[in-house]
Amino acid sequence: MVTRIFLDNAFPIPIVKQTTSIALVDINADKSKLVVVDDHQSMFVYDIKSQQLIFQETKILSAAWNIEAEDMLAYTGKDTLYIKTREMPAST
């Protein structure tokens, strides 16, 4: 489970429930999307507001959002770096 924690609130706020162990989490610049990579090398991208899965990929080792372009995501497979922006397909 991914939760949001505020210093002035004693209770964490759940964002996304994940059924597998989480290896990596990153949030985009405007805090509207979340990427999760699990121990099975599956990547999931969620819309935080609706808590809906936007897309997913398999055999992913790492992922990170761009800090200036809130819809640009970079992620790596075994030997390939992918860049995905908005609804466009990922490019290598």
Image (cartoon, rainbow, N blue to C red):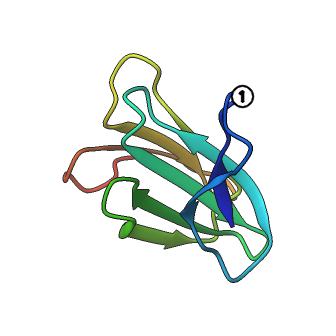
Is residue 88 rendered to the left or right of residue 38? left
Q: Is 39 above or below relative to 47?
A: below
> Where does the N terminus fall, quadrant-wise?
bottom right
Q: Is 46 above or below relative to 92?
A: below
**Residue shown at the point (20%, 51%) measured from the top left:** 88
Question: Looking at this view, is 63 or 13 the one in front?
Answer: 13
Percent across and percent down for residue 59 are 64, 70
Q: Residues within 10 Å of mark 1 (few under 14, many from 20)?
A: few
Question: Looking at this view, is 69 or 9 the one in front?
Answer: 9
Question: Looking at this view, is 7 or 43 the one in front?
Answer: 7
Is residue 45 rendered to the left or right of residue 52? right
**Residue shown at the point (70%, 69%) measured from the top left:** 41
Q: Amino acid at mark 1?
A: Leu
Percent across and percent down for residue 60 are 63, 62
**Residue shown at the point (33%, 23%) measured from the top left:** 69
Q: Is 26 above or below relative to 16?
A: above
Quarter residue 40 falls in: bottom right
Q: Is residue 63 visible?
A: no
**Residue shown at the point (39%, 65%) measured from the top left:** 51
**Residue at the bottom extreme, as displayed:** 19
Percent across and percent down for residue 42 are 62, 72
Q: Secondary structure at mark 1?
A: loop
Q: Is residue 44 visible?
A: yes
Is residue 53 rendered to the left or right of residue 19? left
**Residue at the top extreme, as displayed:** 68
Residue at mark 1: 7
Is residue 91 rendered to the left or right of residue 11? left
Q: How many marks?
A: 1
Quarter residue 17 falls in: bottom right
